[in-house]
Image: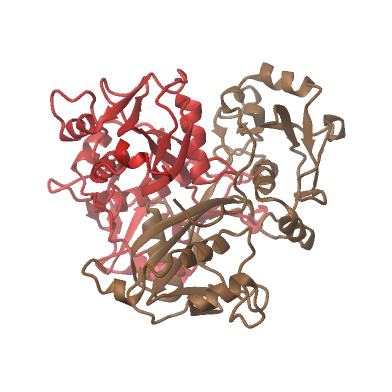
Chain colours: A red, B brown
Amino acid sequence: MADFPAPGFTGSPLVRIDIERGNRGYFDQQVASLSARLLRLDGLTPQVTDDGRLSWGSLAEADPQAELALLGLIDGKPRFVSLARVDEDPAQRTTAMNTALTMLEPEEAATYAAARCLVDWHSRHGFCARCGRESRVFRSGWARLCDRDQGGCGIEHFPRTDPVVIMLAEFEDRVLVGRQHRWPQGRYSALAGFVEVGESIEEAVARELHEEAGIVVRDVRYVASQPWPFPSQLMIACIARAESNLINLDANELEHAQWASRDDVRAALAGSSDAPFLAPPPYAIAHTLLTAWLGEAGSDQPTMRSRPWG
Amino acid sequence: MADFPAPGFTGSPLVRIDIERGNRGYFDQQVASLSARLLRLDGLTPQVTDDGRLSWGSLAEADPQAELALLGLIDGKPRFVSLARVDEDPAQRTTAMNTALTMLEPEEAATYAAARCLVDWHSRHGFCARCGRESRVFRSGWARLCDRDQGGCGIEHFPRTDPVVIMLAEFEDRVLVGRQHRWPQGRYSALAGFVEVGESIEEAVARELHEEAGIVVRDVRYVASQPWPFPSQLMIACIARAESNLINLDANELEHAQWASRDDVRAALAGSSDAPFLAPPPYAIAHTLLTAWLGEAGSDQPTMRSRPWG
């Protein structure tokens, strides 16, 4: 159906045994299994082999003070990650992290994303937001419990996933790309923002494009999605038709924005030295989104857009 | 593009003035405005007028002990909701709540959804999940701050929005609908489940259909989305092609599931007395999803499905 490659951070071979997460006996059995494997992390950064794969050790390597999370099964083997507390800013990517991302195969990055999100979430959610008491690891590492037996309020907490829209506005066969101050020089990408309470994906796309670039859109169409573990977003990639190409930039959000032609996007994705901008990396869904738009082969060209439904 | 009505809980006329949320002066100015309006709630339940609209009063009606959240502007008037603490289970809908939902126009329900999510979120998140200290209302009611001045860790917390996939599996021009034990008698709907960390929308659709009904799918396609404020989901509606019609039910999740034909779905949506099941209510996106599938006019009929790409 789609003529673009699967987005980064997708395709994990992990089989999540959700149904057994609340079963302590199953968990203990997996811990005791001779085939149990532990994901090797340095803080939140994965160890990556030369052929772009994650590195797994035995459970003996785990910090004995830390709890384990059972990620699920890969190749029938139980896969764990240590929930040792990490004190890193999960939104920041170090050089080592960026290097790991360029090396990891997408399906390996996907497994890593699940593990990383759990480790980071537990590290930053040790207390019950409802009553302030310390909570504890629950459901094989996929939840926390504010335990009544410890004087807590009995509430369960689940890892957070924040939906984010990331989108191209399209006008006369060009798409809008923007850049933030802190990005590498020359880098432009799709605009993005968090979906807020009380709005749909389509409404969030329209609101963000209007707030950040003054663009009014209609006909939002969904393209693809990916998890983005910095710290824990669900990226939802869309394309929307702009009513006009007049840009009114919110300088707090964006340093600059520009309309890119198909040739511009093609050159950027190819990494050509004469490309008018530096494309986002292949593991980012903005890369997928630009690729998908090119693949649409001019569905939005002026001759088509003059049809009554345009 | 889409030939189905806009989903419930969408189309709010609310203009979110995100950019001013951190501006205390702007907030105070809106509070002082003679046109300021306060959303009337009984706990978490909206007061609804006879013509299906929300009820708004003056700020004088607000609990003087409670903080206010500035929702945004409607018709140029600042709109507030009181963040008085509510101790209700936000996932449960009372009879009064269900009555309100059948009466509210979709765009009014959308405004209500934003307000309700904020009130409920503040009520259940009075403490910092990172350090356990009490946090305070921040950013005009759209965040909480763990204040360093009060001995806190300085972290900001934002309202939570949990992405949920809701989907129809499709096989030989029939779609899979299921029911949970606690639903009204005869009610069937699309299957649904939370998107987990480290997975895409498409992967969550495939995982949930496999877990709950033993169905293996491919070619997941996005249809529509809506916010669902019980308590704070983003519902993402999809259709996926099933590889087979063999159902293997997870009895913990579902009481029963069945394949519905176009005639079945048409009768259910029309509320016919001879319909084989009771459809979800119009404000639920499952209703939109079933309507959208009918509107596809047999795109998935056997003659089409024998094409090479099928």
Task: Name which quarter of the figure residue A38 lies in.
Answer: bottom left
Position of residue B135 measured from the top left corner of the image (x, y, whole percent): 65, 33
Residue B227 left/right relative to A65: right
**Which corner quadrant holds the N terminus of chain A?**
bottom left
Residue found at x 73% / y 18%: B29
Tell how many labels. 0
Vertical relation: A64 (above or below) B17: below
Residue found at x 48% / y 70%: A23
**Which corner quadrant holds the C terminus of chain A?**
top left
Residue A159 left/right relative to A72: right
View extreme (right): residue: B60
Residue B109 left/right relative to A254: right
Residue B6: tell me if it is visible: yes
Which of A124 and B247 lies nearest the eye of the viewer? B247
Residue A69: tell me if it is visible: no
Vertical relation: B203 (above or below) B276: above
Position of residue A15 measured from the top left corner of the image (x, y, whole percent): 34, 65
Residue found at x 28% / y 23%: A184
Position of residue A125 measured from the top left corner of the image (x, y, whole percent): 52, 44
Position of residue B270 measured from the top left corner of the image (x, y, whole percent): 62, 71
Residue B302 left/right relative to B43: left
Which of B305 and A152 lies nearest the eye of the viewer? B305
